[in-house]
């Protein structure tokens, strides 16, 4: 396993599960975290919520993985990759929050998915995979429609987040399949990148986050956003990326819009229409016929 040191319970458990199983956890928290963040915007400005999210995640990774142990063990290429990933995590999440503060979450998610379509298309070298990609894209198109009258600035932020998400998939896949000194894996490097991201967002976000320190409930809420948005899904991403090709991982992210519809029906009582059910069916069909490449 490329993500953590061999012999641990997490390694053995993860190795016994199919890679797709990690997406069930990642997909749920991928939307649970942002939904909590959007509700928190009414009390704390978006930059403050961003800081709470990344800072909370950085603390969790610091306690769990002690990523500073990587210091002095990274070669130049690995160091550049971690610095780049940390910058991408900071920029991508900032653009995401700025976008969802102006646009519906479904619209931002639809734009975000465009980047993964590009990555999947680059790796779809067989007719079967091309057909799977076409089905997934068709399903996503049915499920999510970009509003023509949306905020222009919000769209700029959303497309910036799309570019950042593409970089996250590429850099995250590289980290997941790189070991440092044969001891530290992808999750350790992810923890180091999150510390870098926390430093990067502090100048812009700490001031906006200060009100949370006088309201324990808000602070706990912000910590919950960090765990749900930047710990659980990113760790499960690493577990999946270590066993899937970048193109396969990008394609399977097509499940996210379908999961959003299901969560909306169960949690928010937003019963899907026939059109939405058709979109879910197309996405599931695409995932079912896709031929995974685990190289």
Image (cartoon, rainbow, N blue to C red):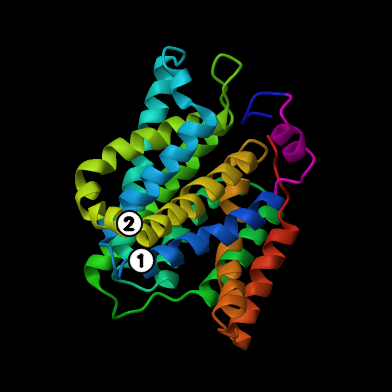
What SS does tag 1 mark? helix
Q: Is residue 11 left or right of residue 174?
A: right
Q: Is residue 234 left or right of residue 167?
A: right
Q: In this view of the protein, can residue 9 be seen by the observer?
A: yes
CB under 8 Å between callouts 2 and 1? yes
If you read the primary sequence from the N terminus, does the residue marked by circle 2 or circle 1 appear first?
1
Residue depicted at 42% across the width and 39% down the height: 58
Q: Nearer the viewer, residue 7 or 273?
A: 7
Q: Is residue 88 above or below residue 151?
A: above
Q: Residues within 10 Å of mark 1 (few under 14, many from 20)?
A: some
Label annotation for residue 40? 1
In the picture, which quadrant includes the C terminus?
A: top right
Question: Does the magenta segment cover residue 14?
Answer: yes
Q: Position of residue 199 (x, y in %)?
A: 29, 36
Q: Residues within 10 Å of mark 2 (few under 14, many from 20)?
A: many
In the picture, which quadrant includes the N terminus?
A: top right
The magenta span reads 7-20
Q: Which residue is mark 2?
A: 49
Q: Nearer the viewer, residue 274 or 64?
A: 64
């Amino acid at each position: 396993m490329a993500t953590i040191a061999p012999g641990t319970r997490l390694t053995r458990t993860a190795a016994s599960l199919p890679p797709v199983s990690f997406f069930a956890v990642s997909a749920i928290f991928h939307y649970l975290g942002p939904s909590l963040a959007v509700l928190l915007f009414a009390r704390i400005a978006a930059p403050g919520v961003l800081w709470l999210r990344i800072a909370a995640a950085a603390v969790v990774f610091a306690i769990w993985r002690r990523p500073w142990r990587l210091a002095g063990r990274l070669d130049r290429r690995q160091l550049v990759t971690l610095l780049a990933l940390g910058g991408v995590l900071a920029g991508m999440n900032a653009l995401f929050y700025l976008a969802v503060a102006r646009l519906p979450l479904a619209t931002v998610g639809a734009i975000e998915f465009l980047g993964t379509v590009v990555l999947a298309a680059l790796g779809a070298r067989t007719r079967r995979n091309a057909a799977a990609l076409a089905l997934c894209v068709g399903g996503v198109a049915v499920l999510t429609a970009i509003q023509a009258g949306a905020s222009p600035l919000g769209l700029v932020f959303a497309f910036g987040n799309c570019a950042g998400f593409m970089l996250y998939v590429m850099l995250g896949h590289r980290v997941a399949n790189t070991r440092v000194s044969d001891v530290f894996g992808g999750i350790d490097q992810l923890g180091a990148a999150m510390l870098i991201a926390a430093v990067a967002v502090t100048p812009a976000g700490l001031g906006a986050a200060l009100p949370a320190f006088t309201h324990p409930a808000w602070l706990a809420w912000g910590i919950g956003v960090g765990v749900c948005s930047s710990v659980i899904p990113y760790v499960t991403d690493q577990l999946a990326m270590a066993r899937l090709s970048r193109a396969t991982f990008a394609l399977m992210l097509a499940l996210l819009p379908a999961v959003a519809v299901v969560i909306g029906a169960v949690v928010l009582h937003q019963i899907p229409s026939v059109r939405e059910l058709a979109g879910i069916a197309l996405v599931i069909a695409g995932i079912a016929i896709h031929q995974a490449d685990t190289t």
